[in-house]
Image: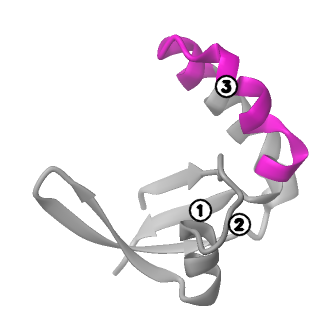
Amino acid sequence: MIVFFCRRYSYGEPSWHSAFRSDSSGQIKLDKTIVNIDGRIPRDLEEIKSAVDEAYDHKLKNLGARFMLNGAIEPRAQQSTMELTLSK
């Protein structure tokens, strides 16, 4: 199973985050490819939070965007973590 984790960086409403909270099904488009996904708050969020923080640290460092790290790992962002999986 392929799993993606993502977090909010903007907190206005309506948002992709609130859309997944009200209906867990959605889609992602990359170029011309569209795939169905399911999004939910991870049941084990407290257990995986530090691993997701580390992944954000690594990715933002590699992108040269380390200045965004504080916002990506602040408590409000951590609590917005969504787990996206490919639909069956």
Q: Which residues are magenta?
A: 58-77
Q: Secondary structure at mark 2?
A: loop
Task: List x then y, in percent, for residue 33.
Answer: 14, 59
Q: Nearer the viewer, residue 70 or 88?
A: 70
Q: Residue type at mark 3: give it.
A: Met
> How dense is the environment of label 1, judged by Cα within 10 Å: few (below 14), some, or many (20 and up)?
some
Left or right relative to 18: residue 32:
left
- Provide the residue designation for mark 2: 42
Disc marking residue 83: 1
Disc marking residue 8: none
Task: List x then y, in percent, for residue 55.
Answer: 63, 31
Magenta portion: prevailing SS class: helix
Residue at figure coordinates x 85%, y 39% from the top left: 74
Quadrant in which residue 54 is drawn: top right
Q: Is residue 42 above or below residue 77?
A: below
Quadrant in which the C terminus appears: bottom left
Disc marking residue 68: 3
